[in-house]
Amino acid sequence: MSAALAPAVSGPARGATHETVAPLLLGALAGALVAGRLETAASCAGVALVLAVVCGARAPSRGWWGTFAIGALLAWGLNLYLTPGTPLGLPQVFGRAATVEGARLGLLLLLRMTGAFAALLALAAVWPGERAADALAGVLRPLARLGVPVAETRMMLGLAVRFAPLVRDETARIARVQRLRSGREPRGPFEWMTRVRAVVVPALTASLERADRVALALEARHYRVRPLVPARRDRSAGRIVSAAGGVLLFLAAALWRAGR
């Protein structure tokens, strides 16, 4: 536990070189979340994907891609058949016909999901580890005057980032143990769901117990939230252009959605 609470020590992070584009990434993320038209959603997704490549974002695992693909197909199918409009000519499902409007909304949702995920991956490369908590706390610092617990939120985010690898490894270990205990691969969806529950329940219990121990340790050591040191303002031309671009992306997505 002491190793997990120790400050992370690393060399110069590659993401620090690209920190100038962080405001543009935040604008693309916020714009993707509120976009209501294909044009703005595609713009946010394109900017996020390009910056993710430029910043050297780490590609997700195959399991992540599978989960994303299943969620995207399910969301597109629901929009395709549950949205009223002009019939598309596809076979009916439970008496519902696929519509052009549903296909459009499904594509819009896919672009929004792609833009948001790509922006998050790029931000993780720009602000590795706890730097994300400190950077976001610096952005939200003015809200502390209104009573928003910015410092406490930063501490919780920092702890979550430090303990995420431990929770991941513990979950993988429990999954291996349960697989060995079962003696074979699951057969059918019901056995698969039972196997998932057999992994999730003990993993969640272990995480709660670890959180309880960490809270007791912090209290025993009279831990206090360290003050947030104001970051040096970057007034370079690149930073200003990035901030302006992020604001424009978000405003275009939000105002165009409001004017529909």
Image (tube, rainbow, N blue to C red):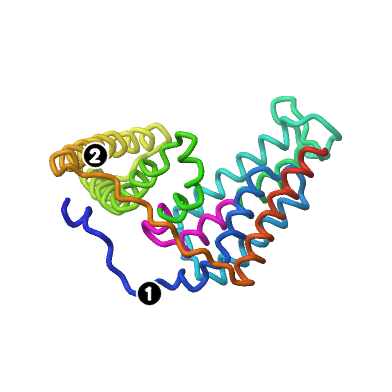
Above-or-below relation of 42 to 155: below
Left or right: 1 in relation to 184: left
Query: Where, quadrant-wise, is the C terminus in this rendering?
Result: top right
Residue bounds of the magenta highlight = 116-133
Closer-to-camera residue (259/202): 259
Residue farthest along the front direction in this orientation: 145
Badge nearest the viewer, 1 or 2: 1
Residue 211 badge: 2
Q: Where is residue 159 shown, x and y percent of the image?
A: 30, 48
Q: Main secondary structure of the magenta part?
A: helix
At 21% from the left and 57% from the top, the residue drawn is 6
- Disc 2 is placed on an element classified as helix
Identify the residue at image location x=70%, y=42%. Answer: 106
Name the kind of residue labelled 2 in the image. Answer: Ala
Q: Quadrant of residue 26?
A: bottom right
Residue 12 numbered mark, or none: 1
Nearer to me, 112 or 154:
154
**What amino acid type should be assigned to the residue bearing mark 1?**
Pro
The image quarter in which residue 11 lies: bottom left
Residue 134: horizontal and vertical position, in percent? 41, 54
Find residue 170 and name its label: none
> Of marks 1 and 2, which one's residue comes earlier in the chain?
1
